[in-house]
Amino acid sequence: MPENNTFKGAGVALVTPFNEQNEVDIQALQRIIEHVIEGGIDYIVALGTTSETPTLSHSEKIEVLSIILETTNKRVPVVAGLGGNNTAELSKAVKTLPSGIVAILSVAPYYNRPSQEGLYRHYAEVASATSLPLLLYNVPSRTGSNMNASTTLRLAVDFQNIIGIKEASGDLTQVMHLIQNRPDDFLVISGDDLLTLPMLALGADGLISVMANALPSPIKHLVHSGLTGNFKEAAKHHYRLLNLIEALFEEGNPAGIKILLQILGLGSGFCRLPLLKASPALQQRIETLIALY
């Protein structure tokens, strides 16, 4: 099992680029992987929300994961996003991941809207089904339910392989309770580029970033400056990125980051339905902001 420090830093929630035929663009995916590694990113999260995973077929998920593992070639750790709202099926799926995956990022069950006890039992079954480290992922804006601090902390205490949480509730009070009461070595990782600076100031352990697909180096410097207590430097990067980060999410994720990748020549702006490519107005706004960066 990797040390928890493996995930203390700046991770990237990797996009899945598509071409005009709505197929996975393998060459663009490889370019983006090389770009984030060269930019110093600490680890890659594959098949997460930003990857548009719900629109990928089973065979495409296998292909994307294989390309990521092959291209990274162990230069950076790879975490697999693997979640769902069917506990029994997810508990089977965690046993089928390929070698080379160092941890699992598992989003809280969506649509079902389980109780706190239901969330606890869901993750208890998943954690018991694998020996891999498990990062919880709380993102109420997408799942429809919030996993509160007491449920997260209960899981952290009860399961040795539940090593942290990607916390994207946007609730800094909840973050404070997590950090104040967590066991030693339990990671609290920002799931929101915009709130990373305040979360680091509260004692969080890093970020799993959308922006890092395009600007990995500035994101790494922001995170590592905060982790070493240099908040003046971290704030400099934060405020330089602020308007651009806000623009990325104006029309949902990953429309904004994909159009930025297109502007930078790393991929296309295409998304799969029901998500749409960024509007011409947003593209123009992002072009202006990146030119000023």
Image (cartoon, rainbow, N blue to C red):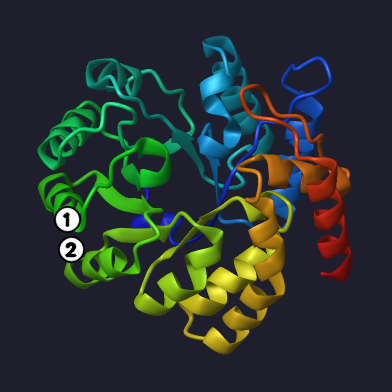
Label 2 belongs to which residue? 183
Label 1 belongs to which residue? 153
Position of residue 201 measured from the top left corner of the image (x, y, whole percent)? 42, 79
Residue 52 appears left or right of 261: left
Instruction: Work out which quarter of the rendered image holds the N terminus and state it.
Output: top left
| Depicted 206 relative to depicted 117: above or below | below
Instruction: Work out which quarter of the rendered image holds the C terminus and state it.
Output: bottom right
Position of residue 15 measured from the top left corner of the image (x, y, whole percent)? 64, 37
Position of residue 124 measured from the top left corner of the image (x, y, whole percent)? 16, 35
Instruction: Mark 1 and mark 2 in contact? Answer it, CB < 8 Å.
Output: yes
Position of residue 52 measured from the top left corner of the image (x, y, whole percent)? 58, 30
Q: Residue at x 68, y 52 (%)?
A: 248
Q: Residue at x 32, y 59 (%)?
A: 187
Location of residue 70 (image quadrant):
top right
| Depicted 42 relative to depicted 267: above or below | below
Mark 2 residue crowding within 10 angstroms, few (<14) / some (14–19) / many (20+): some
Q: Amino acid at mark 2?
A: Pro
Q: Secondary structure at mark 1?
A: helix
